Image (cartoon, grey):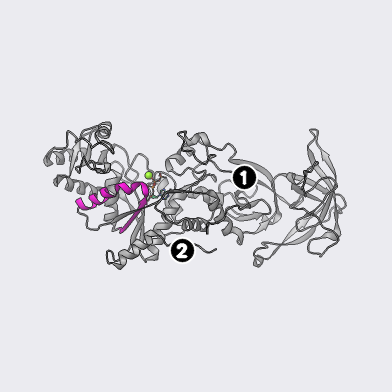
Amino acid sequence: MELKSSSNFLKNILNEDLKMGKVDHIITRFPPEPNGYLHIGHAKSIVLNFELADEFKGKTHLRFDDTNPTKEDTEYVESIKEDVLWLGYEWDNLFFASNYFEEMYKRAVLLIKKGKAYACDSTAEEIRQMRGSLTEVGQGSPYRDRTVQENLDLFERMRKGEFKDGEKVLRAKIDMASPNINMRDPVLYRIAHATHHNTGDQWCIYPMYDFAHPLEDAIEGVTHSICTLEFEDHRPLYDWVVRECEMENVPHQYEFARLNITNTVMSKRKLKQLVEDKVVDGWDDPRMPTISGLRRRGYTAEAIRNFAREIGVAKADSVVDTKMLEHFIREDLKLKSPRTMAVLKPLKVIITNYPEGQVEMLEAEINPENPEMGTRQISFSREVYIEQDDFTENPPAKYHRLFPGNEVRLKNAYFIKCNDSVKDEFGNVVELHCTYDPETKSGSGFTGRKVKGTIHWVDALQAIPAEFRLYEALILDEDIEDGTSFLEHINPKSLEIVHGFVEQNIKGAKPQDKFQFFRHGYFTVDSLYSTGDHLIFNRIVSLKNTFELPK
Ligand code: ATP
Ligand code: MG
């Protein structure tokens, strides 16, 4: 498939900056906070940052923005590294913001010395109240005019742990009347007596995002710091911090639209809640929009990369249809994955005129769309399984599958005709008695008569039992921004588990192997629970493709 070139407004900026000599090389960064697993929204940022830099022979850093000790964990650090690598990107440098805490502290001291920062005893609530609004200017803190000496002393004592959480903060002294609320003396440091995953108990004051992030970028020599749109109004503060802290390297912030997908929650906080409330079976549950969940579901890195490239970068927020993501996995697997037959909800068929004990091998293509994959042998005998849905006693109009007296083709095998059915004590059909016509073998050139239906099947003697996990969207509603919690919109039918059989050719299938099951869609072997004795397949996506890429 032809991909849209990654041409976008950011690429134009980079191009221009290089041409005008504003920068002589490009450094971007992907800066996750290690407070959860990465999701598909992060993939957009990863693809963008790594590929932009790559295009201009630049570098990309993986930087953990770990300035919030209570929410962060090394488990998340490890999972993030794994996911970035799996997506196919290698960072040029790996950094932790927490390694710059001493440097950040020194820069804060510099601000105090310049009269640009002060220790404030107001509570969070008081600070919020005095901040004003879009129509009202803010009020200055009663601690705003403390002397440099007093501020230096208090900040040092904050660091030493002399105060409790929330007792004091360090604030920038900018402009309480600024039309941009972010500039009304924002908090730079808070007190948190908490153990940090990297620095342990070394610190009890931690820098706020708006102070830390520009310093991290400047320290690392990042040239283009790309973030999502909600930070647009923070850009003047970003520039203020870099300037007033007298950083040698001057990075610039650019914003692009966050990725949203229909029927999907996309925030680590919410995803964490799904995990903690056990709505799902962990961060890598195949219904999760996390990279690890998509991987376990059977998505390939290539499909995710192509999806991210196609959606591109825009300056306006929008919601992308899940069908678009599905489109890319079908595209990727279409030519790569072997076709086989699997019966998800089996019904036994006895072919009464087929000799007992006889087994024959039938030849079939492994992938009709990719003949180079060659052929496979499928065994056929007197007993086969078909789908329960492929038989009915009372066929509606245009039903071309099996019903009493009707004839269909068994894919790659013979015509069979249904003569009789056996029912259990509840009246459910549990077995069909059919006859086959040896003249009608697939590939024999038989033209005697035609049938309207072709159904799939597996040889009951040779087939391998398997579990199939069929997924639907985890979140029901298109739009959940109606004041209710997303937890009230969980799809109770997001997972259906059924037990059936797969063709014997799949024997030995390993976790992450991918197949197209005829008429059912693409499946992968579950990497967590599937074993040699108990095969479990996750349905990645069904075959039906109703999505067309915009031209
Ligand atoms: P979340 O609310 O899911 O935790 P976040 O923005 O707080 O998201 P970070 O770990 O801080 O998550 O993000 C790392 C990078 O990924 C940031 O540069 C951020 O802009 C980007 N990012 C996060 N979510 C999305 C998204 N939905 N679409 C595009 N980029 C995103
Ligand atoms: Mg965050």
Type of amino acid under label 2: Ser
Q: Nearer the viewer, residue 78 or 29?
A: 29
Q: Tag on residue 469?
A: 1
Q: Nearer the viewer, residue 258 or 154?
A: 258
Residue 18 position (above or below residue 494)? below
Q: Is residue 25 left or right of residue 496?
A: left
Image quarter for residue 60?
Answer: bottom left
Q: Nearer the viewer, mark 1 or mark 2?
A: 2
Q: Please report whichever mark, 1 or 2, sits nearer to the chain's N-terminal start.
A: 2
Q: Residues within 10 Å of mark 1 (few under 14, many from 20)?
A: many
Give the extent of the magenta segment. 222-245
Disc 2 under 8 Å from ligand 1? The reply is no
Total of numbered circles in the picture?
A: 2
Residue 252 locus on image (x, y percent): 29, 56
Disc 1 under 8 Å from ligand 1? The reply is no
Give the secondary structure at mark 1: strand
Q: Is residue 399 left or right of residue 472?
A: right
Give the secondary structure at mark 2: loop
| Main SS, magenta residues | helix
Residue at point 68%, 43% (across, down): 499
The quadrant of the image that shows the N terminus is bottom right
Type of amino acid under label 1: Arg
Q: Is residue 463 left or right of residue 483?
A: right
Q: Is residue 229 magenta?
A: yes
Residue 208 locus on image (x, y percent): 28, 43
Q: Tag on residue 5?
A: 2
Residue 119 locus on image (x, y percent): 19, 38
Image quarter for residue 374?
Answer: bottom right
| Residue 135 visible from this viewpoint | yes
